[in-house]
């Protein structure tokens, strides 16, 4: 079954301690950091992730963008993130697709749950993202150490290494 996570971007920024602190300095940096973390999580988990940012107070048309292979949607003028998330849940939910909505907004969780989406509280998403980062680091460390252990010379005895070194120096086998 295909899995899609729709993330209420600003809600998650406010709920995750690191991003909430960063938001006080720069909302744009907090948004970029969230996108980066979710892009890594998407590539590791294989789940499609859509991040929704509220542009309710911003004039103009919203839009859909891809940043770091992650789908990012901004709402249209006079549209809330909740309204866009609800619309996406309705469009994307099917028998073959399970949609999760990541938000700490209880009302939004209830409404989308009523439309067939599953709730994914901000804390659970943070745990999942942190876990995937740990697992990626562990895999990279394993791969790096296995490259060292799997080198050709690691398979040879010291006697064979000495013989090859003599050949390299032109002294031939003894």
Image: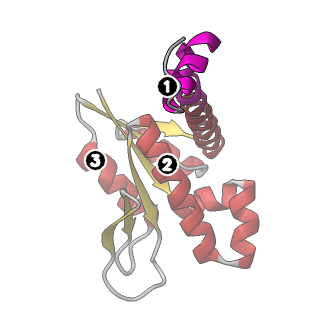
- Bin the neighbour count of mark 2 within 10 Å (Cα to Cα): few under 14, some 14-19, many 20 and up: some
- Bin the neighbour count of mark 1 within 10 Å (Cα to Cα): few under 14, some 14-19, many 20 and up: few
Where, by quadrant of the figure, is residue 19 drawn? Answer: bottom right
Q: Between marks 1 and 2, how big is the CA–CA gap? A: 48 Å
Quick check: 66 above or below 148?
Answer: below
Task: Give the mark, 3 or 2, whose residue is nearer the N terminus.
Answer: 2
Q: Are marks 1 and 3 in contact (CB under 8 Å)?
A: no
Magenta stretch contains residue 42? no
Residue that mark 3 sits on: 90
Quarter of the image for the C terminus: give it: top right
Quick check: 66 above or below 107?
Answer: below
Residue located 23% across and 29% down the image: 96
Residue 150 visible within the image = no
Where, by quadrant of the figure, is residue 115 drawn? Answer: top left
Mark toward the viewer: 1 or 2: 1
Magenta stretch contains residue 148? yes
Residue that mark 2 sits on: 40
Q: Which residues are magenta?
A: 145-168
Residue located 63% across and 61% down the image: 13
Where, by quadrant of the figure, is residue 87 drawn? Answer: bottom left
Residue that mark 1 sits on: 167
SS class, disc 1: helix
- Bin the neighbour count of mark 3 within 10 Å (Cα to Cα): few under 14, some 14-19, many 20 and up: some
Q: Position of residue 31 (x, y in %)?
A: 56, 68
Q: Nearer the viewer, residue 28 or 53?
A: 28
In the shown orientation, is residue 164 left or right of residue 162? left
């Amino acid at each position: 079954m295909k899995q899609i996570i729709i993330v209420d971007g600003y809600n998650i920024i406010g709920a995750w301690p690191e991003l909430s602190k960063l938001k006080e300095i720069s909302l744009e940096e907090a948004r970029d950091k969230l996108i980066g973390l979710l892009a890594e999580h998407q590539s590791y988990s294989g789940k499609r992730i859509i991040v929704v940012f509220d542009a309710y107070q911003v004039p103009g048309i919203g839009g859909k963008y891809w940043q770091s292979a992650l789908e990012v949607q901004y709402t249209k003028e006079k549209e809330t993130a909740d309204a866009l998330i609800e619309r996406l849940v309705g469009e994307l939910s099917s028998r073959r697709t399970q949609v999760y909505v990541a938000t700490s907004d209880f009302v939004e969780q209830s409404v989308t749950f009523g439309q067939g989406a599953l709730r994914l509280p901000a804390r659970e998403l943070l745990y999942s993202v942190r876990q995937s980062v740990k697992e990626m680091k562990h895999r990279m460390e394993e791969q790096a150490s296995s490259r060292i252990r799997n080198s050709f010379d690691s398979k040879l005895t010291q006697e064979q290494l000495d013989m090859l070194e003599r050949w390299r120096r032109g002294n031939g086998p003894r």
